[in-house]
Amino acid sequence: MGGNVNVNETNAGQRIINDREFALRLIADPTSAEARQVVEAADGLRSETVGDSIHLRGLIEFSNYCRNNCLYCGLRRENGKVSRYRMTPAEIIAAAENGAELGYKTVVLQSGEDPAYSGDTIAEIVREIKKLGLVVTLSVGQRIPQDYELWRSAGAERYLMRHETADPLLYERLHPGQSLVKRVALLKILKELDYQVGTGFMVGLPGQTAETLWYDLKLAGELQAEMVGIGPFIPHPETPLGQEPGGTLEQACLMVALTRLILPQALIPATTALGSINPLGREAALRAGANVVMPNLTPKKYRPEYEIYPNKICLGEEAAECRGCITRRIESLGRTVACDPGHNSIWLGRRSGS
Ligand code: SF4
């Protein structure tokens, strides 16, 4: 299939998956007229499928300890310049209470891979937060399936674990001692446990090609991910990739748009990383198919230490200021903040048996 493409065609998502030449041509030039058409089409599809309201997820970054050594990450265990912290269960629950008071419907508990929090400890935290009437999303990395099962029974509804790159060799290079096969197997287990599962990937990684990004899209589609997070690679000076060039806003927004076409019902965040490379980066993603924003609820004293990448935005603001700022930004786009919990509709349909 060559020649001009009508990106408004109803099967555009299938075409991206099946038509290699089409997909690679788009991905290779994210500033082309055709790519801009795709972004517009994805924005239109987003409005039709998931509507114009935007879901807020309050992010609590509760530990910056990590046993892993991912080459791009400022929290990697060999970065001795990080001042490490762990929030206590009481601090985590208090941050969630603050979120509930500010009107959040979901909190996302995120950390490095930190074995100091046992499966039982996290389950207890989830149970306490559920008493506040909040939806709980976990993002604590690779654990044994029994932990995932325990947390699901404790009430956690969603799990975020990006695959980061669908190229198995690049994955192994970037994540020493880890494998893509295992990561994907865990994502499938999470699906079987009836979580809403979030995967995602980085754009602009050293060694990544247009074809790799196409595989990233195909993998998200194959997993039927309920959520897909896409962020630009941002080089962190205290990592082995500190001197590499980073990903661009245009590349990332195009991948957001293509993801929307492939997974029309997905929850797709306008990531903080996009807001960190461009002051209006999140707004651009929200115009390219995204429908979620994740403002920070982490207590201010800890925020600067959760530096996966440098120059992260919103480090100095109180949670209430972030809430106000993000609402103004959303309203400036003519969109509204959602009042419902913001579950993936396919997941909801499965649960009601429809
Ligand atoms: S990317 Fe995640 S798992 Fe890897 S070092 Fe950073 S915090 Fe740890």
Image (cartoon, grey):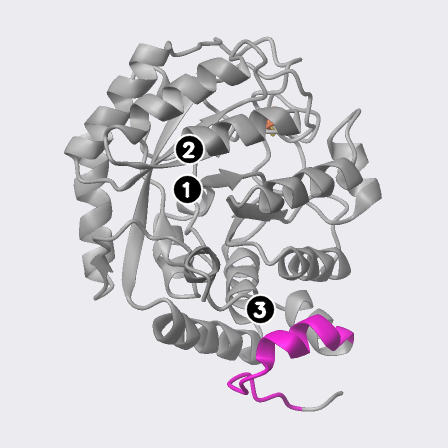
Residue depth check, mark 3 versus mark 2: number of the one nearer the observer:
3
Residue 29 within the segment the image draws in magenta: no
How dense is the environment of label 3, judged by Cα within 10 Å: few (below 14), some, or many (20 and up)? Answer: many
How dense is the environment of label 1, judged by Cα within 10 Å: few (below 14), some, or many (20 and up)? Answer: many
Q: Is residue 342 above or below residue 73?
A: below
Q: CA distance from mark 3 to mark 2?
A: 29 Å
Residue at 49 percent of width and 28 percent of height: 151
Q: Point out which mark residue 312 bears.
A: 2
Residue 225 x %, y %? 57, 54
Residue depth check, mark 1 versus mark 2: number of the one nearer the observer:
1
Q: What amino acid is found at the position of numbered circle 2 in the picture?
A: Lys
Name the residue carrying label 1: 272
Q: CA distance from mark 1 to mark 3?
A: 23 Å
Q: Point out which mark residue 107 bears.
A: none
Secondary structure beneath disc 3?
A: helix
Residue depth check, mark 1 versus mark 3: number of the one nearer the observer:
3
